[in-house]
Image (spheres, rainbow, N blue to C red):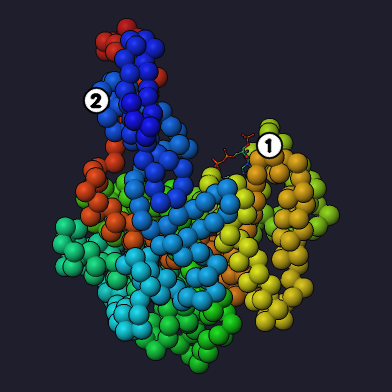
Amino acid sequence: MSKNTLTLRDNRTGKTLDLEIQQGVAGPPVVDIRSLYGEMGIFTLDPGFKSTASCTSQITFIDGEKGILLYRGYPIEQLAEKSSFSETAFLLMKGQLPNQQELDEFNDLLTHHTMVHEQLLNFYQGFRRDAHPMAIMVGVVGALSAFYHDSLDIHDPQHREISAIRLLAKIPTIAAASYKHSIGQPFIYPDNHLDYSSNLLKMLFAVPSEEYEVNPVIAQALDKILILHADHEQNASTSTVRLAGSTGANPFAAISAGISALWGPLHGGANEAVLNMLHEIGDVKHLPKYLKRATDPDDPFRLMGFGHRVYRNHDPRARVLREEAQKVLTALGRHDDPLFKLALELERIALEDDYFIKKKLYPNVDFYSGIIESAMGIPSNMFTVMFALARCVGWIAQWKEMIVDKDQVIGRPRQLYTGAAQRDYLPINKR
Ligand code: CMC
């Protein structure tokens, strides 16, 4: 028996099976159970994938115990401080940092695909003015597959590449239009003289009747926010993109599925929920009441922006964002922002609370992002859209990795059936 195996014994039959234990570059070892059903006729049960790796990946690594996040090996703190969003996007998609020429070419490609097919803009008129911008994102990003037929062959590397660039380049345009639609302002066309984040700000906040000048402090902070949200290994939305993509669906459809998965309040929707929660708490004096509710097992209330499936330590993204929030608020002359003060105090008392200490619950990326975005003038119903826009890079990188993975097959989980045993149909008068 090899040292690198886990022996499984079925006590009903005495049959044993040696399963290979694989060690990645970092992280816990993984038992390869692919032969389990064939050899033993047994499935595994793991709701929520708490112990299950769904794929091998070379893109992002998280050490949840130590609070480490690496994109292609680079610590997130270094990328947030030194990189730009487009450079990080190149890194995630291609596997290494670009040289100057590669970055220039990549930026040029992104800039020249920012416009969407004019007919696509007609879709917005079909949405009610009060539609949630995420609802619009799901529809319009999915609709890209109805417009770009020339890049839908997922087996053609060039098609995959052009689809990836189109998605990355067009998603800010689509996101900004979803906001403009909700406030009844005309869509602003992309400005190819601007970098990714500055262009996004302009499309969100400019109006055709006035000059718009990008505030560099805000543009830089936004770029940082996008970097921090760009990928996070096999989270719910990324796994959704992989699962949808595993069927051979085109990337626009797969990414639209990812946007749907991201929307929920336990995932990307948490940033909007955090702000709503802070507004509901309203004042520092109400914090103890809400903390008590969060720790009451009979109360469904949770502290939004706290806890994480993988991190059992500080989420490194939250740390960067807390510092950034301070910087942005100071630059905007809002260092006394009551919401930020409330958030800081909530963090302080939660981190001293036995319940949060015992369960290792720390602020996650969503805790501070809404506060900065709100200071930038972004409304709370757009927070998750901003998350989706940034995560689009990760989804694309993971989708591209999956398509060329030789182990890739259609994702098709099994189940433990607990319903009725086979029975015969009874005519209605006999029931
Ligand atoms: N407030 C109060 N209790 C919590 C919280 C919280 N925010 N998060 C987890 N717990 C408790 C939970 O009740 C459970 O207690 P018990 O063991 O007594 O049943 C325990 O901690 C473990 O929680 P879990 O739900 O089993 O853990 P999970 O890994 O399945 O869930 C989570 C992770 C992020 C869904 C959860 O922590 C949560 O609901 N947080 C609030 C929503 C949020 O901020 N989501 C954003 C996540 S980060 C960005 C992203 O993924 O998009």
| Residue occupied by mark 1 | 299
- Secondary structure at badge 1 equals loop
Residue sitting at 84 percent across and 54 percent down? 285
Q: Relative to residue 76, is residue 411 depicted above or below?
A: above
Task: From the viewer's perspective, tell me whether residue 259 is left or right of residue 81.
Answer: left
- Secondary structure at badge 2 equals helix
Q: Disc 2 residue type? A: Gly
Task: From the viewer's perspective, tell me whether residue 123 is left or right of residue 235.
Answer: left
Residue 291 visible to an observer of this rendering: yes
Residue sitting at 24 percent across and 68 percent down? 161
Residue sitting at 36 percent across and 56 percent down? 58
Question: x and y percent of residue 430 in the render?
Answer: 32, 7
Residue 182 visible to an observer of this rendering: no
**Cα–Cα gap, marks 1 and 2:** 44 Å
| Residue occupied by mark 2 | 38
Q: Which mark is residue 308?
A: none
Crowdedness near tag 2: few (<14), some (14–19) or many (≥20) residues, C-alpha within 10 Å: few
Q: Quadrant of the N terminus?
A: top left
Task: From the viewer's perspective, tell me whether residue 362 is left or right of residue 9.
Answer: right
Question: x and y percent of residue 341 in the render?
Answer: 76, 65
| Quadrant of picture, ligand 1 | top right
Query: In this view of the protein, which residue sits in the foreground, 287 or 314?
Result: 314
